Image (cartoon, helix red, strand yellow):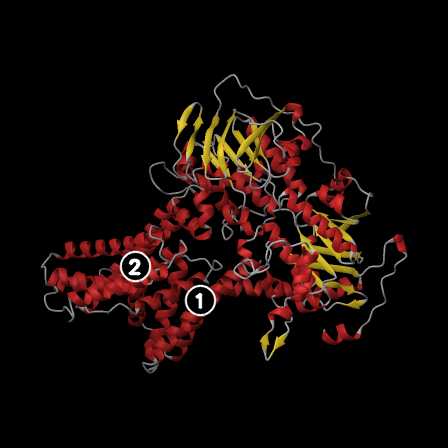
Amino acid sequence: MQAAKARTPDLDSGRRRRAALTFISRYGTIIGLLAMIVFFAINAPGTFLSRANFLNILSQASLTAIISAGLTFTLVVGEFDLSIGNVASFIGLVVAGLMAKEHLPIPLAVALALLVGIIIGLVNGFLVTKVRINAVIATIGVGTMLTGIGFSYAAFPIAIGIPRAFTEISLGRALFGVPNPVFIMAALLIVMWTILNKTDLGQRMQAVGSNIEAARLSGIRVDRTKMFAFATAGFCAALTGVLLTSLLGSGTLAAADGYLLDAFAAVFLGSATLREGQFHIAGTLIGVLILAVGFNGLSIFGAPTYFQPIFKGGVLVLAVGLSSLARRYASAS
Amino acid sequence: MVSEAAGIRAIRGDPGANGIPEAWIDIRGLGKHFAGEVALHDVNMGVARGEVHGLVGANGAGKSTLIRCLAGVTVPDEGKILVAGDELRLGSPQASEKAGLAFIHQELNLVPHFSALENMLLGAPKATRLGLIDWKRSSRPARAAAERVGIKFPLDARVSDLSVGERWLVMISKALVREASLIAMDEPTAALSGPESEQLFSIIRDLAASGVAILYVSHRLDEVLDLCDRITVFRDGEVVDRAARGGLDKRGLIRAIVGHDVKGAEGRRRIEADKSGVPLFSARDVARGAAVKGVSFDLYRGEILALGGLVGSGRTEVARLAFGVDRLQRGHFEMSGKRLTIGSETQAIELGIALVPEERRSQGLMLAQSVAFNINIASLHSLRVVDILPFLSSRKMRNQAGRLIKDLGVKTPSPSTKIASLSGGNQQKALIARWLRPDTKILILDEPSRGVDIGAREEIHNAIRKLARSGVGVIVISSEAEELAVLADRIVVMREGHVVGELTGDDITEARIVEMSYHDAVGS
C-alpha cells in the first residue's frame, strides 16, 4: 500500500506534464502569436497598435497566405512543391507582359495568367504521379526552368504600359478601407477550408496523405487527387504573382521567389497548431500571421536588414521542428 | 540509478516453492500505468535457464509491456527485475543487453542492404588490427552461431534477398553472437510457412537444451502448448494463470485468456449454399505469372468461401487480381454470369467488390485519422448532403460511423478518437466496417484475424457470418487451418498457384485442410 501511495504524486506529475505537452503542441503557436502582439503593443504602442499598421500587416500577410494555402494542399496529400515561388514570379511577368506587350484587356490577362499557373501545377503533378519523379526534384526543376523562361521573356522589369486600373486590384480598398487582397485571401481561404474539410475531395486528399496504399485500396484515384493538389498550388502561386505585380506596378524577374521560404515556414508552423502535425488551412493562416507580425515588429524596432533572413530561417527551422515534435508526440500517445 | 544497480545485490528468488525451478530472470511486483490506465499490475514471474516459457493473453493484456520493460524500452512504475540475482537497471536498453537479454520483434530489426554476417555483428564488439576491423577474426562467433542454428545460405547474402524464415535465423544468430542467455520472441510464426515454423521450433528446443531461456509470445495456442515448458497467461495487465507443461489444455488456456468459455468448431453450423442458380462470383482459369497458374472457383450468395493453403500458395495474389490491384494475364472473373473487366481498385469497388487487405497497418489504416474517418472513407459519395454536390453531411458521416461502430462492436471512446490508439482487433473491425455499404456484393478478407486477440477474433468471425447471411458473398483467406475450419462454409485449397481441392460440410477439419495444403490429395 505504501508503494501505491508513493506512486501517486509521481503519476500526477507525469499526467500534468503530458497535459502541458498536449496544450503546448496544440496552442503553442497561437500563444506565441498573442505574446508577440502583446510585446510589440507594450513596447511600441503608438506605431504597432494602430489601425493603419494592422491593415498593413494584414495586407502583407494576404499574399503569403494565398501562396501558403496552395502549398498546404500539396503537403496534405504528402507531396512537396518547391516551384511556387518561381511560379509566382513567372506569372507576375506573364500578366505584366500580356497587358503591356500584348495589350490584352485586364480580365483576360489575369484569367490567362491564372490558367498558366494551373497548367504549371498540372505539369508538376504529372511529373510526380505519372513519371514518378520525386516531388522535390521535379518541382525544383520546373521552377528553375520557369526562371530561365522568364528571363528570356523579360530581362528588365515590365513597368511601362501597365494600366492604372490593374494596380488598383492590390492597392484599392473596396470596403471599410481594408485593402482588396485581404478580401481575396479571405474568400480563397474559406473556399479551400471548405474543400479540405467539407467535401469528399478533401477527405480523399487527407486519406492519400495519411496512407497512400490504404487510400488506393479504398478505391481512391490517388494520382488524380494529387494532380488536383498540385494544380491548386499552381493556381494559388499564380494569384500571388498577379497580386504582387499589381502591388508593385511592374512585372519583375524573381520578384516573388522569396515567398517560397515564407510559405514553408507558415505551413509547418500551422501544422504544429491545433491538430498535432497535420497540415490544415486554419493553421497555415496562423503561421502566416506569426511571420507577418514578426516582420512588422522587426521593422518597427528598426532591426537591421540582415536580421530579416535570420528571423525567417530561424522560424522555418523552429516550425519544422515543432511540427515533427507534434507528430511524434501524437503518434506516441 | 547507477549506484543502485551496482550496489544492491538482492537475495536469490526462493527456489523450492511450488517446485518451480530456480529463476534466472526473476520479475517481482512489476507495475506500469499509462495515463492512468493499468498496463501491468503486480506481475511476478520467473524464467529459468533452459526453459521455453510461453506468454499468452489477448492484445493489450500486458505481454508487450512486460517485454518492453525487460528490454529497457519502457520504465516500470514499480517493482524490479533480477537477472541471476543481480538487480537489472531499469529503462536502459544497454543494461538489458549487457545482462544477456535479447529481443526479436515481429518487424525483425535488420538492415536490409547489409549482409547476414554484417547484421549479426551489428553493434557487437569487433576485433581490430591496426585500428581497422579484422573481419576474419570478428566473424568467427557469427559463423559459429550460424552453424548452431543451421543456416545453409551464404553469410554474405544480403538480408533483403533472404526469406522471412531465413531472416529469423539471422536474428537468432545475432542474439547468440551477443551470448544472450534469454531470447524473447514476439509472434515468431506469424509470417513463417509450415516447414519454416517446424525448423524454428527445433532450433528453439536446441537452444533451450543448451541453457538459453526462451520467452515465447504467441497467439497460436497449439504452438505454445506444444513448445513451452511453462505458460504464463496475462489478462488486463495481470498474471491470471500459470501452468507447467500438461497443466492446461487448449480449452483451459482459451478460458484463461478470455475469462470465459468460447464455443469451439464443433457446434458450428455450415450453410450449404443454393448451388442451383448462377454463382454470384466466379474465377475462370485466372492466371498471372508464377503465383497464380489458372485458378477457378465459384462463390454463391450468402456463402463464406475460404481460400486455404500455405503462405505463398497464391491466395493473396488471387485476391489482388479480383480487386483490380494486379492485371490478369489469362482467364477472367464473372459476376452473376456476366464477364467482368476489372482494370483498377476503383472499378472493382464500383462493381461491388471489396477487399480488407492482409497488412492492417500499411495497407488498411490511416493512422493519423479518426475512427470515423477510417470507416467512412470508402463510402463518401453516399454521405453527401445532396447527391449532385460534393459537400459532405456531418450528420450523415456521424450517423454512419456511429451505427457501424455499434454493429461491429468497435471499442472506441468516441468516433473521433484517432484509430492509432485502438487495439489491433478493434482496428480490424473498423476496417471491415469500411466495406459494410449497401453496394458491397463481394467481400474479400485477407488474414482477417492476424495479430488479433482471441476475443476480438470471435467478434470478427461473428460479424463475417452475419454479413454472409445478409446475402453478401464472402471470401476469406487465412493461413490458420483452425480459423478456416471454424469460419468457412466451403474451402478451396490452393497449392503453388493451383486449386488442389475443395472441402465441404463435415469434410472441413483442420487436419484435412493442412493435409491438402501440403500434399496433392485430391488433384486438380
**Type of the residue with mark 2:** Met
Are discs 2 and 1 less than 8 Å apart at CB? Answer: no
A250 left or right of B107 in image: left
Image position of B199 with respect to B522: above or below: below
Residue in the picture at 42% in, 33% down:
B330
Chain holding disc 2:
A
Q: Label 2, on which residue?
A: A185
Question: Is residue B72 something one can see in this rendering?
Answer: no
* In this rendering, position of residue B149 left or right of residue A90: right
> x, y (%) of residue B131?
59, 79
Disc 1 crowd rating (10 Å Cα; few below 14, some 14-19, many 20+) is many
The quadrant of the rendering that contains the C terminus of chain A is: bottom right
Residue B271 or A96: which is nearer the viewer?
Answer: B271
Disc 2 packing (10 Å; few <14; some 14–19; many ≥20): many
Image-quadrant location for residue A3: bottom right
**Whole-Å distance between the Cαs marked 2 and 1?**
24 Å
Please tell me whether mark 1 sits on a helix, a strand or a loop: helix
- Please name the residue that numbered disc 1 is placed on: A320
Position of A267 relative to B188 (above/below): below
- Residue A226's disc is none
Q: Nearer the viewer, residue B84 or B162?
A: B162
- The image shows residue A261 at horizontal and vertical percentages of 35, 68
